[in-house]
Image: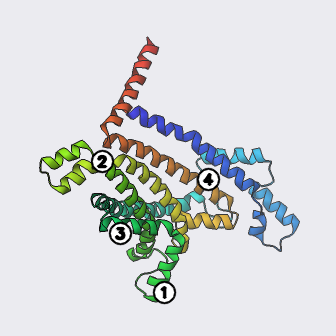
Amino acid sequence: MINYIIKRLLTLIPVVIAVAIVIFTIMYFVPGDPAKNILGQDATEEQLQRERELLGLADPYFVQLGKFLYQLFIKLNPGTSWLSGFPVMTELRVRIPRTLLLSFLTMALGVAVGIPLGVTAAVNQNKLPDKLCMIGSMTFISIPDFWLALEAVILFGLRLHWLPTFGMSSWKCWILPVVCGSLPGIASNARQTRSAMLEVIRSDYVATAKAKGLAPGAIKYKHALPNALIPLITMMGGHLARCLGGSMILENIFSMPGMGMYLTTGITQRDYPVVRSVVVILAIVFGVVMVLVDIVYAFVDPRIKAIYENQTFNLAFWRKRKDA
């Protein structure tokens, strides 16, 4: 199992390097002149050319790419923001925990509410709870995140004055972003849980548990739900990635100083070091999340754990044969 985890982590290295090359190439060919954004429209051509040389923009493509990869992966220094003058790593140390916390809270609320709703809908198939759950799921899946967040700001912030709509000064500032971000996840989790549970509750071992007289709650959550978790775990991993992407929108709407606002500002101001660094960090986080999903598989399903252990055994056996 350890060898499998190490192998999966090593496969992330070429993926992250490829992402870094792609985002560098995109920002290299994107229209616009960062020197003009820094010096303003009134700057002379000599001043602009001098600024481009200071920023390294006058070098050829491969020279700039080599410097970028060396700074990022060898020196572990993504550089300095061209606009603020502060090191990008210093800003990321402060902003990354905020974005991750927002994403994890959003996903946790989506799981904590969506899975019980899906279980309830499945055990009450074609009844009123099932119909209400499916109508609500279709509604919130269809509503765009940004529109829902804007409506929440208008209703709960500007009209009712119940909750703050910007900043991170207190725990109340997290309520609207987390709820607005989790509603589509609740809907997706409920639909997927319902589909998985409908397949499981018709199984023979569930009928046997009912014949033994076990409590309905034990049948649902101890026997049926664990066997329906495999597709749900896959969906949760994708949902966390979706929450990280959605946090970019939520942070801008609710003025939360996380990676989303940092990335958006970097894109609009042509601050290349900021954009490149945030994209690479997100790629690393997504890759680690997918590895964690595979590890969770092994703890939920013993059959998958046996496959991983068999791969590890075969690897050790091959090494012994090679040494012999």
Image point 53% across, 74% down: which residue?
Answer: 147
The dot on residue 158 is 1
Query: Residue 18 location in percent, x, y?
Result: 63, 43
Which residue is labeled 3 in the image? 132
Question: Nearer the viewer's eye, disc 4 or disc 2?
Answer: 2
Cα gap from disc 3 to disc 4, whole angstroms: 49 Å
| Up-down relation of residue 16 to residue 305 (above or below) | below
Amino acid on which the number 4 mark rests in the picture: Pro
Query: Split into 4 quadrants, where in the image is the N terminus?
Result: top left
Residues under numbered marks 1 and 4 in contact, where contact means CB atoms less than 8 Å apart:
no
Which residue is labeled 4 in the image? 78
At mark 4, the secondary structure is: loop
Task: Indicate which disc, 1 or 4, sits on the residue closer to the N terminus.
Answer: 4
Amino acid on which the number 3 mark rests in the picture: Leu
Task: Indicate the quadrant where residue 301 lies.
Answer: top left
Question: Nearer the viewer's eye, disc 2 or disc 1?
Answer: 2
Query: Residue 102 location in percent, x, y?
Result: 44, 64
The dot on residue 3 is none
